[in-house]
Amino acid sequence: MPSVCSGPPVTVEEKILSGAYKPLTEVKDIGLRGSRKAVAQWHAERAKKKAEGLQLLEEFKRDLFEEYGVSDNPKRDLVWEQAVSSGHNFLEVAEAFKHLVPLIT
């Protein structure tokens, strides 16, 4: 069980538990019944959410690399891909990464 700290989150796990990596919210589905303008707005909002999600994922990835000291390791992306394939959320990916990173350090 992670320890509760009173200061700002320091580790990736603490950031996850504090909500720093917020899950993406879905864009409300309008189906095929919207006007062209509504459909265009829906697509724009969906694209914006997707971009925000990719940015959040990149921040999470960068934080993991920094925390485990593998930012310059050429094999870090191999470990990342394996961790992502075995985890379903940020906490599971971080846990898998933690167990896999010794293979490249």
Image (cartoon, grey):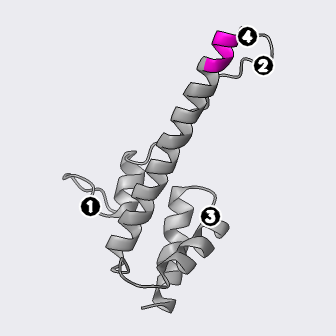
**Disc 3 + disc 2, Cβ < 8 Å:** no
Q: Nearer the viewer, residue 73 or 86?
A: 73
Q: Is residue 42 magenta?
A: no
Q: Which mark is residue 87?
A: 3
Question: What whole-number distance in Å separates the C-alpha atoms at marks 2 and 4?
Answer: 7 Å
**Dot 4 corresponds to which residue?**
34
Q: Quadrant of the N terminus?
A: bottom left
Q: Report the magenta stretch's main SS.
A: helix
**Dot 1 corresponds to which residue?**
10
Q: Is residue 57 left or right of residue 15?
A: right
Q: Earlier in the sequence, mark 3 or mark 1?
A: 1
Secondary structure of the residue carrying numbered label 4: loop
Question: What whole-number distance in Å separates the C-alpha atoms at marks 3 and 4?
Answer: 36 Å
Task: Residue 100 in the image: state x and y as whole percent.
Answer: 53, 82
Question: What whole-number distance in Å separates the C-alpha atoms at marks 1 and 2?
Answer: 42 Å
Q: Nearer the viewer, residue 3 or 51?
A: 51
The residue positioned 24% from the left and 56% from the top of the image is: 5
Amino acid at pointer 3? Gly
Amino acid at pointer 4? Gly
Q: Nearer the viewer, residue 67 or 3?
A: 67
Secondary structure of the residue carrying numbered label 2: loop
Q: Which mark is residue 31?
A: 2
Q: Is residue 44 above or below residue 9?
A: above
Q: Nearer the viewer, mark 1 or mark 4?
A: 4
- The image quadrant of residue 85 is bottom right
Amino acid at pointer 2? Gly
Q: Nearer the viewer, mark 1 or mark 2?
A: 2
Question: What whole-number distance in Å separates the C-alpha atoms at marks 1 and 4?
Answer: 45 Å
- The image quadrant of residue 72 is bottom left
